[in-house]
Image: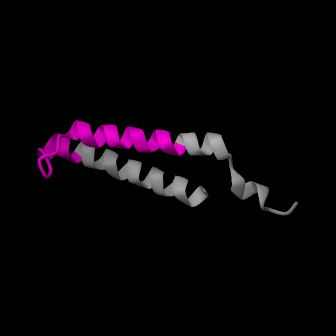
Amino acid sequence: MGNLVRVLIGLAALAFVLAVVTHFAGPLLSTQPEAYSRASTNLALLAIALVLTYGNTASARRPL
């Protein structure tokens, strides 16, 4: 589950960077910056929901 959360966070960061770039450079593939911004927010919220739902399972596997 931790890998999925990391992938979602990485995709959210990429979407945020695309939103900033398209804001200053113009639409990319006929997509407005707001679409990338919304995608970034939605991916980040999915990552947060997964962490809150399943918790940090990586620490549960470590021996004491």
What's the magenta bit mostly, secondary-structure-wise? helix
First to last magenta residue range: 21-47
Point out the image quarter for the N terminus: bottom right
Q: Name which residue lies at 39% across and 53% down.
A: 11
Of 33 and 42, the residue lying toward us: 42
52 drawn magenta: no
Position of residue 32 measured from the top left corner of the image (x, y, whole percent):
17, 40
Q: Name which residue lies at 46% across and 52% down.
A: 8
Of 49 and 26, the residue lying toward us: 49
25 drawn magenta: yes
Position of residue 10 measured from the top left corner of the image (x, y, whole percent):
43, 55
Residue 56 as seen in the image, left or right of residue 48: right
Q: How is the image coloured?
A: one colour
Q: Name which residue lies at 68% across and 46% down.
A: 55
Residue 39 as seen in the image, left or right of residue 50: left
- Judged from this view, the residue extending furthest toward the bottom is 63
Position of residue 54 measured from the top left corner of the image (x, y, whole percent):
66, 46
Q: Quadrant of residue 63?
A: bottom right
- Judged from this view, the residue extending furthest toward the right is 64
